[in-house]
C-alpha cells in the first residue's frame, strides 16, 4: 500500500477534541465516526484517532478495516512514520483514521507519548477527534492527554449519567488544559420522554451542568450504516441521527445551529401524545 | 379538559423518568462529595441535637439533605420544624398546659432553616 498523503501545510495546529463517556456502549465510537465524517463533509481536514488500544473498532464503523496497515502504537514506538499509519477515507480525502493496535493493550503507551503524538498530528488537520475507551483508567488518561475540548456522550439512563458525572469531575480537574466540555445526549427516545418514562434532556443537563451540543435520536439506521461502514452523517435524512451529528459538527466549527425537533420522529399517536404531555 | 386527554392517552404526570431524575440528582451529589447517605443521616442526628439545645424541635418531621445547585455546586439543606414554646413533652407542666391550650399540638409554622454553600 502506498503511503497516505497528509496535508502538506504543517502549521495547522487544529483543535483536538476527545469523545468520552465513562460507561461503555453508549455510542462513543459511533459519535466519533459520524462527527468526523460530518466535519470532513464541511470541508475540514479531519483526523479520527482510535485510542481503544486492544479493542479496535473505529476502523469498522468507517469502513476502513481492510486498509489498516500500521497503528498508533507502532507510530509511538517508531516502527513507522505517522503518515504511513494514517488511513485516508475513500469518500473524503480530507478525512483520515489513525487506528488503534489490536494485539496490544492500554499499557503499551503512556500519556506523555500520546500527547507528543497528538501535537504532531494536529499540525496537519483542522480537527482531531480522539475516540476514548470506556473506563476511567489509563486508556482514559491517555485519551485526554492532548485534548483541548471534550464531548461527553450519555444515554438517558441512570448508569450512563452517573458514570458521565465521574468523567466530568475528572475533566474539571484539568480545566486549564481542557477548555470546553460539551454534552451529547445519545439514543433519545422521544416517545418515552413525552410520556415521562425517560429522563428528560433538561434533567440530564441540569444534573451534569454541561453545555449541550447535541441531541441524537435513537435511530435503527445506525445499525444499517455500521453494517455498511458508512457513517449515517453522510447518508442520513434530515430527520435521522445523521442530521443530529451533522448539526454537532457545524456547532463545533462555531456555527449556531438550532436543535432538531425530535418530535418529528414520533408516529401519529406519538405526536398526539406530545401535544398533551 | 387537557387532563382528560392525558388520562385517555395514558400520560402520567410523573413517570419513571421523573423518579430516575430525582434519584440521579441525589446520587451524583453523594458521589461527588464521597459522602454516603448513612453519613448524612448521622450529620442530621447531630444537627438536631445542637438545634434542640436552643429550640424545642420536632425531630419527626425534620429533614436534612444535600442538594445540588447549578454549576456542580451543592449545599446542605436542613429544615427543622420548631414546636411552640413550652410544648416539649419533657416539660413537667405539659399536662397542665394541654388542658389550657387545646391546640397545643399544632406546630409552629416557622422553620429553622440552615444552608451552607
Image (cartoon, rainbow, N blue to C red):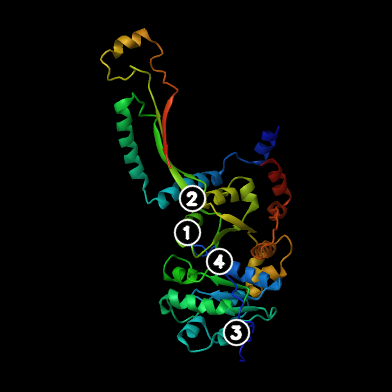
> For this rendering, which residue is in front, A115 or A261?
A115
Quick one: SS at disc 2?
loop
Look at the image and tell me in which quarter the N terminus of chain A lies.
bottom right
Cβ atoms under marks 2 and 1 closer than 8 Å: yes
Are labels 4 and 3 on one chain? yes
User: Going by the picture, which residue comes out furthest to the left?
Assistant: B92
Q: Which mark is residue B72?
A: 2
**Residue A109 location in percent, x, y?**
43, 78
Image depth: mark 2 or mark 3 in front: 2
Residues tagged by mark 2 and mark 1 found on one chain of the structure: no
Q: Residue at x 43, y 27 (%)?
A: B111
Q: Earlier in the sequence, mark 4 or mark 1?
A: 4
* Residue annotated with mark 3: A66
Would you say the residues marked 1 and 3 are in contact, meaning their CB atoms lie under 8 Å apart? Answer: no
Picture disc at residue A172? 1
Q: Tell me the SS state at disc 4.
A: helix
Q: Earlier in the sequence, mark 4 or mark 3?
A: 4
In three-dimensional space, the C-alpha distance between marks 4 and 2, rounded to whole angstroms, equals 24 Å
Amino acid at each position: 500500500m502506498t503511503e497516505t498523503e497528509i496535508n502538506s501545510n504543517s502549521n495547522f495546529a487544529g483543535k483536538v477534541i476527545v469523545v468520552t463517556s465513562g460507561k461503555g456502549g453508549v455510542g462513543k465510537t459511533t459519535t466519533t465516526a459520524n462527527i468526523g465524517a460530518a466535519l470532513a463533509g464541511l470541508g475540514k481536514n479531519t483526523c479520527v484517532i482510535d485510542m481503544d488500544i486492544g479493542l479496535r473498532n473505529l476502523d469498522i464503523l468507517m469502513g476502513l478495516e481492510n486498509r489498516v496497515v500500521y497503528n498508533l502504537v507502532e507510530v509511538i514506538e517508531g516502527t513507522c512514520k505517522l503518515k504511513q499509519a494514517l488511513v485516508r477515507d475513500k469518500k473524503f480525502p480530507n478525512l483520515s483514521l489513525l487506528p488503534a493496535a489490536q494485539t496490544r493493550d492500554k499499557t503499551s503507551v503512556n500519556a506523555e507519548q500520546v500527547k507528543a503524538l497528538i501535537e504532531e498530528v494536529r499540525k496537519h488537520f483542522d480537527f482531531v477527534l480522539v475516540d476514548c475507551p470506556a473506563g476511567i483508567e489509563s486508556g482514559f488518561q491517555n485519551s485526554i492527554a492532548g485534548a483541548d475540548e471534550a464531548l461527553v456522550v450519555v444515554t438517558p439512563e441512570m448508569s450512563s449519567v452517573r458514570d458521565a458525572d465521574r468523567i466530568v469531575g475528572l475533566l474539571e480537574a484539568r480545566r486549564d488544559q481542557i477548555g470546553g466540555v460539551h454534552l451529547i445526549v445519545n439514543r433519545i427516545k422521544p416517545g418515552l420522554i413525552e410520556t415521562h418514562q425517560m429522563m428528560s434532556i433538561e434533567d440530564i443537563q441540569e444534573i451534569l451542568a454541561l453545555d449541550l451540543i447535541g441531541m441524537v435520536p435513537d435511530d435503527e439506521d445506525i445499525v444499517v450504516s455500521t453494517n455498511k461502514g458508512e457513517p449515517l452523517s453522510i447518508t442520513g435524512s434530515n430527520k435521522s441521527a445523521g442530521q443530529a451529528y451533522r448539526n454537532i459538527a457545524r456547532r463545533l466549527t462555531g456555527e449556531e445551529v438550532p436543535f432538531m425537533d425530535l418530535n418529528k420522529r414520533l408516529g401519529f399517536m406519538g405526536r398526539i401524545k406530545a401535544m398533551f404531555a | 379538559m387537557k387532563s382528560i386527554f392525558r388520562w385517555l392517552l395514558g400520560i402520567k404526570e410523573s413517570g419513571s423518568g421523573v423518579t430516575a431524575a430525582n434519584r440521579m440528582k441525589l446520587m451524583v451529589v453523594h458521589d461527588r462529595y464521597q459522602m454516603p447517605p448513612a453519613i448524612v443521616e448521622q450529620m442530621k442526628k447531630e444537627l438536631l441535637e445542637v438545634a434542640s439545645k436552643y429550640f424545642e424541635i420536632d425531630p419527626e418531621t425534620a429533614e436534612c439533605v444535600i442538594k445540588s445547585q447549578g454549576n456542580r455546586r451543592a449545599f446542605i439543606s436542613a429544615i427543622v420544624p420548631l414546636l411552640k414554646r413550652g410544648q416539649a413533652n419533657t416539660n413537667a407542666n405539659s399536662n397542665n398546659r394541654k388542658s389550657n391550650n387545646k391546640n397545643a399540638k399544632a406546630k409552629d409554622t416557622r422553620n429553622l432553616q440552615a444552608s451552607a454553600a
